[in-house]
Image: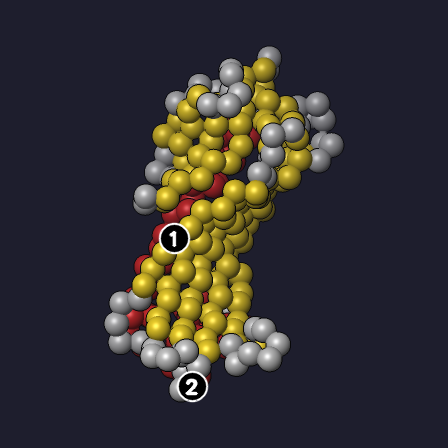
Amino acid sequence: MTGCQKVMRHIRAGPSDGRPGYCRATIHHGETRVGWFEFRPHGRGVYLVVDGSSRALISERSLGRILRDADRSIELFGRAEAVVADRAADILAGPPEAVTLAVSMGAWVELSTRYSYRRGGDAFIRVSLTAHNRLQIFSRVVRHARWISLSLVFGGRGEEELAAQLAEDLAEIFKQPELTRFRQEIPASDARGSQAVIWSETTAHRTLDAGRGEVA
């Protein structure tokens, strides 16, 4: 697994442009891509570099698991996108304006697709679906958390009934009743919204300095 050329459906690895001798893992989804972490072979394992400076020595097995788990999280994100877009188009009677953005905060990367409906005047309904992948390096463990969050925001006159119907459908599909509990988004604003984590997993990998570098 320590060669640089790794190609999965949503995760790619290749030579790093900014760090000679290292490989860089990148998350891909459609036309959107975002860089994540770097790694290189080192003795009996792999040096993981997160956020440019945090380092840990892990096994090749752990590296492979991190890449596969991230790939699966983006696969599930894509399936959730299809569900959200279908239900929103059905309830709101038309395809949304959809934009996918990627944000890298070093150890924490996000892919987010925002579905926006402008209903005339200042009325709007917006649904945002975000896939998160986060690596945290501790003294003896590298923790990989991944989760998918869903939020719904609406504002303007006459949108509450449609927003509530969409929220109820999504809450039933994803088994997250908190999506139906709207709260005021901004003080002195009529915008209201709800949010929930619809899927999550966390895996801990031991560092080679602490053990064998396998799943804790």
Label 2 to label 1: alpha-carbon separation: 27 Å
**Label 2: which secondary element:** loop
- The residue lying toward the viewer, choosing from 208 and 50, is 50
According to the picture, the residue beneath numbered tag 1 turns out to be 100
**Label 1: which secondary element:** strand
Please name the residue shown 34% across and 60% down the image. 98
Please indicate, yes or no, whether residue 113 appears anywhere in the rendered image.
Answer: yes
User: Around disc 2, counting alpha carbons within 10 Å, would you say few (fewer than 14), some (14 to 19), or many (20 or more)?
Assistant: few
Please indicate, yes or no, whether residue 164 appears anywhere in the rendered image.
Answer: no
Please name the residue shown 64% across and 39% down the image. 136
- At which x and y percent is residue 106? 57, 38
- Relative to 45, say whether 127 is above or below: below
- At which x and y percent is residue 57? 63, 24
- The residue lying toward the viewer, choosing from 5 and 99, is 99
Q: Of the residues shown, which amino acid type is indicated by label 2?
A: Arg
- At which x and y percent is residue 78? 36, 52
- At which x and y percent is residue 115? 37, 64
Judge from the rendering whether residue 114 lies leftward or rightward of residue 201; answer left or right: left
The numbered mark, 2 or 1, whose residue comes first in the sequence reads 1
Residue 157 is tagged as 2
Please name the residue shown 59% across and 39% down the image. 107
User: Around disc 1, counting alpha carbons within 10 Å, would you say few (fewer than 14), some (14 to 19), or many (20 or more)?
Assistant: some
Q: Of the residues shown, which amino acid type is indicated by label 1?
A: Thr
Which one is in front in this view, the residue at disc 2 or the one at disc 1?
Answer: 2
Please name the residue shown 50% across and 59% down the image. 149
The quadrant in which residue 105 appears is top right
Judge from the rendering whether residue 90 lies leftward or rightward of residue 194; answer left or right: left
- Relative to 64, say whether 150 is above or below: below
